Structures are given as C-alpha cells and as structure tokens.
Image (tube, rainbow, N blue to C red):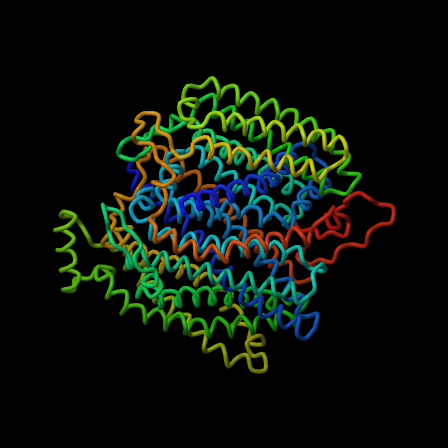
Amino acid sequence: MELAWYALLGLFFAGYLVLGGYDYGVGLLLARGADPARRRAALNAVGPFFLGNEVWLVAAVGILFGAFPLLEGELLAGSYPAVLGALAGVILVTAGVQLRSRPASRWARAGWDRAITVGSLLAALGWGTVLAGLLQGVPLHADGHVAGVAHLFTPFAAATALAVVALVAAHGAAFLALRLPATEGDRLRPLARRLIVVAIIAVAAAAAVGLLSDRVRGAAQRPAVGVLLGVSLVAALLLARAALGRRRHGVAFAATAAALALPVVLVGATLWPYVLVSTVDPAASLTVADAAASAPTLRLLGWLALPLLPALLGFQAMCWWIFRGRTDSRAPVYW
Amino acid sequence: MDTLLLARLQFAATASVHFLFVAVTLGLVTLLVGLQTAWVVTGNPRWERLTRFWGQLYVINYVLGIATGIVMEFQFGLNWSGLSRYVGNVFGAPLAIETLVAFFLESTFLGMWIFGWHRLRRGVHLALLYGVALTAYASAFWIMVANSWLQNPVGYEVRDGVAHLTDFSALLTNPALGMALGHVVSAALLTGGLLMAGISAWHLLRRTPDHDLFRTSLRIGVVTATLAISLVQGFGFAQFGPVLSVQPTKFGGTSPEAEALIAEWSARFGPGDYLPPTLANVGLGFMILIGLGLGLLWLLLPLLWRDWIIRLRFPLWLLMLAVPLPFVALILGWISREVGRQPWVAYGLLPVDQAVSPISGWLMAVSLIGFTLLLGTLAVTNWVLLARHAARGTADPALGRPPAQPAADDSRPEPAFA
C-alpha cells in the first residue's frame, strides 16, 4: 500500500517536472529576444495546457500531505530555503503567464515577461535543490526533526540545481520545436540541440560532483541503480538530440520529457527503502513505510483514488487531445 | 524573533488574501454558469457578450486565487510541520482529497474553457464551465471539512501521541461544518453578486455604451446579493449554537462549560491562558453590523420595477459604495473563526506552539516578509487590472475573441491580437 502511494507521489511529481518543466523552459527562453510577437506565440503554444500543468504540483503536494504527512513536514521544513525559492518561482510564473497580456502597454508586458523568466529560473533551481537535498541525505536527528538548513548548501546541490535549469531549458525548446508552426519550430532546432548539449554537460557535472561527495555515496542505498538511471538520463538526452537532427520532434520531446522524469525515479530508487536518509544518526533515517500515513487513512484515500485517477488523467488527456498539433494563426490566443 | 508569532502572522496574511479572491471566484462562477447556460439555450448573442465580459473578470480574479492557494498548501509543511506530524493522518486526508478532486480538475477544466471558445462545441464548452463550478464548490466543501476538523477534531484516536483516523464520516457530519459551509458559500455569492451589481452600477452611472447589457447584469447582481445576504444572516446566526457547543471558549466565553473545559486543559496540558484574544470578538461585532446593514438590499429589490433603481441614480451609488463591505466582513468573520480557536491548532488537541516548525526566527521572517510583499503586490496589481477591465466595458474582451482568419501567405504564428 505504501509502495503504491509512493509510486503515485512519484508519478505526480515527475509529471509536474515534465509538464511544468516545459512551462518553465518556455519561460526561460522568453529571455532570448525582445520580439513581443514571438514571445506571445511561445506563451500561447503552452496556452491551453498551462493551468493543467501547474496543478500537478498541487496534486503531488496533496498526496504528500495525505499519504506521507511525516515526510511532508520534514521535507518541506527541512529544505526551507529551496522550497521557498521554488514556491516564489511557481507564483511568479503562474501570475505572470496569466496576467502578462492583460495590460495593453508593451512596457508592462515586457515587465511581466521578465517576471516569468525569473520565476522559471527560481522554480528550476529550487526543485533541483530539493531533489539534490534528498539524494545527499539530511541531518535527521533521533527526535525526528531535520536540524537547520545549512545542509542544503553543497556543491552537489548547486550542480544539480543548475542541471535542472539546463534540462528545463532544453525541454522547453524541444516543446516549442514540436508545437510552434513548422517554419518557426524548425528555426528553433539548432537552439534546442545546443541546449541539449549544455544539459548533458550539466548533468554529467552534477553526476561527477555527486560521485565525489561522501554524503551522496553514504546516502545511496542502491548506488548501481542510481548510476544506471543517471546513464539512461544522458542516453535520453542523446536520443533527443539525434531525433531533433532527423526532424522527429515528437520523439525528441518524449526523450526530453523522460530526462525530466528520470531524476525523480532516480532519487526514489536510489534511496529505497528510505526516503530521508540521516547523515548524523543512521537509526534516525526515515523509511517510506514509516513516513506513510497509518493504514485507515491510506485505505480511505485508496478507495477514493481508484475511480478518481482515471478521471484526472482522462481529463488531462482530453485537454492534450483537443489542443493537439502545431499552433497556427487560428489557434486561440489569450495569455 | 518569535517563530510562532511570525508563522501565525504569515498564515493570517496568506489566508486573508486567499479568501478575498476565492470568494469572488466562487460567487462569479455561479453567475457565469447562469449566463453561459442562457447563451447556449437561447442562442442570443447578448448572453455571449455578458459571459465574455464577466468571464474575463472571473479569469483575472482566479489568478490570485490559485497563486495564494498554492502558497497556503505549502505553508502547512513549511511552517507547521508539527501539524502534519501529529494530526496529518486525519487532517491530511480532506486536504489531499481537495487537491485531487477539486483543485486539479478545476484548473484543468478552466484551461480548456479559456482556450476552448470557437473551438469546442457549445455544449462541451458549457459542460467545462459546469465542471469548473462544481469543482470550485467541491473545493470549498473539502477545505471547510479540513478547517472544521481543526475547530472540532472528531473521528480519531490518539496512539503514541499521534492522531489516527477512526471514522471518516464523523469529519463529514462535524457540527462545526454544516452551517459554516452554508455561511461561507452564501457569503461568496453575496460578494460576487454585489461586485456584479456595483460594476454594472458604475457603467450605468457613467452612461457608457451597452446600457442594456449592464441593466441585465445589474438586475442579476442585485437579486443574487439580496437572496444571498439573507442566507448569510441565516447560516451565520444558526452557527452560534453548534459552534458554542463544540468550542465553548470561542467568543471569550465565561460559561460553566468553558470554565470546565479550561480546567480540564490545565490539568492535561499544564496551566496557561486558554482564552482566545479579544480581537476575535471585536471583529465579529463589526461583521454582524455589516451583515445587518447589507440586509437593506431588500429595500432595493422593489426598485427593480420599471428600472427605478437606475432612474433614481442614488441606489446605483449605494451599490457601488457597498462593494467593499462583503470583503471586510469576510476577513472579520474569518478572523473570528480562526483567532477564536487559539491557542490551539486543533482545538483541545494540539497547541499552536507544538505545531510550528522548528525553523529559526530570521528564516521565518524572510518567508513572511517575502511572501507577504510578493502576494500583496500581486493582489494590488490584480485589482488594478480587474478595475481597468471592468471599466473597459463589454466591447471586446480578450476572452472568447474569435481567432483571425489565416492570411494565405503568412505562416508565422502572428498573434491575432497583440
């Protein structure tokens, strides 16, 4: 039961990184040019999906609270500055995308666009730090509390945060290449391919720093799985680059999507059966089963999730289906 | 710095801003459902124009509702990790259900509704709005289930210092829930109705174009607000009984029940001040005054006959001036409910000082100042945008604007309305 909920938590958080990831990637790419028409086209390429993408995070945190209350408190409070940064970023992007076209002045719109870019950067850095924080273990004491927040500030956390920024930017470019009108999308291919190379370098750097870090090596319960998943991440990125070269935009987007989902799987699988590994007291480490809510709560939520999950995924799929394909001049413009 | 006080201030600030926006969301979406249904059923374009105009305001307002909602959700874990540690097994369930059943679906539907104009069949497009409205009400319901549990914890047993769920149905039949839910939902309808009436009144006073459309929305707003204020009053006064039966100390009570409860708490948790601050009662008094004052809306209802409400003009001024009142009352009522629960997070079960996260004061202060500034700025910006779009009138809101015809030789994604 705990495993099923842990998988569901992973599904929603990975889903958020994939879907919210291209929102943020598009947000970062707004910084590349001041052409207002092009910026607006990029945002409206995300258009109908935007609201549905952001709420994967809301659902993930809901599951975290309902099914893993102990983890919720310690993870969020224990990674306070990282979560604060990510949250500020999420708010800026959410408000920025929805409000940027409401003022008519070019100046105001450019200001909102900057807010979206900064927000996207903060969100990517913040979630990268949270993931790295899990992987390098936390100072969890016998009283069950994570002590302080200084444990977050390590080279590995910084490298991972930057790697997530690079991943998100590459993913955003792959999304735009797939979604914008063919000529416009084609023009983005070289940029997307360059960004994928940057992402590969950033991921490799983060992996190297991680392998050199005592804390990461100490926290990893299944290092082989971690290395394997890290290698698949790089393989996914290489595949994305090759696919872009052959104009297989769908394949490329699927590959960068996998590259954003894999870090979640990597963290979950490498630490299993733990979710918070203590760096100060091995006995204080928190297993997934210990972190989970008690059986009656999980049973109740389970009965609810059984019919609900197909509906949630179904309505999301409906949204993707209705607005599938490339945007054109007849596509609705609202953001 | 006192981490507990800072955490409480942050919760109060975020929740207050959140409340101001979600009340409008809930009220307006109900009216929008009516407007769009009228459009789909009659096919009359005047209903489409009304749906687009009020829908535009609804969508702008929604932005801050979702932004503050996300901050609220994270705040439980960030600032109140003791809450999830000790009562998360019970309190977490309704919140998790709310995010999945309501929040997630509401946003998914709304995204499709905004971009679905001229693309989806009218019936499907209308069904999406019904989905948005239903999930909005579901959201209010589950949040009130969770909040009522904090007011009056039920359906649990404590083992090893941690609360475990024993009876979920007790959460749904919580005496702190029913009347409060009715009160909050009708307050949202009042807020939405009065906002609609006030904005329409502004246009009618200025004699802007589309007199006819604003006459219609004025009438809808006035009728909605008038009916809603009576519901607000009814549910409000009906709350006193159940609330005082489960929370005898709520209104600073010196009843025998309150004294017995305080004696019991002193024995279990040690001596302390178990009465809420007087702030809670002062706010309650003002809120009741506003509620009774708005009851005068009934006097405006007969003036709808032969448009006397418009011809006399001063009722329009009154409606405009009344728009802020429900917002003030919302905050005061909320303060009364939440501050009246002090010094507990979960009444009689978990004191606030045990629930707050062991975070250093300065970090909590950074979070408080940062998020209050961020959300405060966004809220003010949002209201300015709302006011501008309200003043612009029904001529051509961006929401639901028909896409331009594709130019034969233009393959650039030229935005149709930059």
Give percent across and percent down for residue A254.
65, 38
B279, B44: nearer the viewer: B44
Residue A286 vs B411, above or below: the answer is above
Q: Picture quarter containing residue A93? A: top right
- Left or right of residue B370, residue A113 in this image: right
Residue B292 vs B58, above or below: the answer is below
Q: Residue at x 40, y 49 (%)?
A: A66
Residue A166 at least partly seen? yes
Residue B10 at least partly seen? no
Residue B133 vs A233, above or below: the answer is below
Residue B1 vs A1, above or below: the answer is above
Q: Residue at x 64, y 42 (%)?
A: A109
- Number of marks in picture: 0
Check the image and name the residue furthest to the right. Answer: B409
Give percent across and percent down for residue A24.
59, 38
Give percent across and percent down for residue A132.
47, 29
Q: Residue at x 65, y 34 (%)?
A: A29
- Left or right of residue B53, residue B141 in this image: left
